[in-house]
């Protein structure tokens, strides 16, 4: 499970950096807390489907982009 959490976190970080957002800006756009975004990016938190959708919308990407690489 840790590999899945880390993979999703890495994908969020990747797309966040492409957009040029800070963790704080992404959190605000997704209506989440900055520390939550940080812990998800580090693979420490198990992100819910609802929050995957919120983050994807904030990044203006499809939610499945955040699940890329999961087999």
Image (cartoon, rainbow, N blue to C red):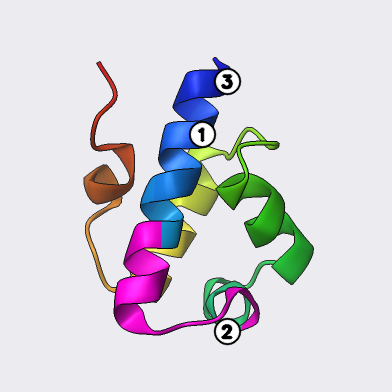
Which residue is denoted by mark 1 in the rendering? 6
Q: CA distance from mark 3 to mark 2?
A: 26 Å
Q: Residues within 10 Å of mark 2 (few under 14, many from 20)?
A: some
Secondary structure, mark 1, is helix
Percent position (x, y) of residue 29? 53, 80
Where 34 falls versus 43 (above or below)? below
Q: Image quadrant of residue 48? A: top right
Q: Is residue 35 left or right of residue 31?
A: right
Instruction: Please name the residue that numbered disc 2 is placed on.
Output: 25
Q: Identify the residue at horizontal 27%, vertical 73% (top origin).
A: 60
- 18 relative to 52 in the view: left or right: left
Q: What is the secondary structure assignment of the residue under circle 2?
A: helix
**Rendered view: 47 above or below 51:** above
- The residue labelled by disc 3 is 2
Q: Residue at x 55, y 81 (%)?
A: 22
Q: Which residues are magenta?
A: 14-24
């Amino acid at each position: 499970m840790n590999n899945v959490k880390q993979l999703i976190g890495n994908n969020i970080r990747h797309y966040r950096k492409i957009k040029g957002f800070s963790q704080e800006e992404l959190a605000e756009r997704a209506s989440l807390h900055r520390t939550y975004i940080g812990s998800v990016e580090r693979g420490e938190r198990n992100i819910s489907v609802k929050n995957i959708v919120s983050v994807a919308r904030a990044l203006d990407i499809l939610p499945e982009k955040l699940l890329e690489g999961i087999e």
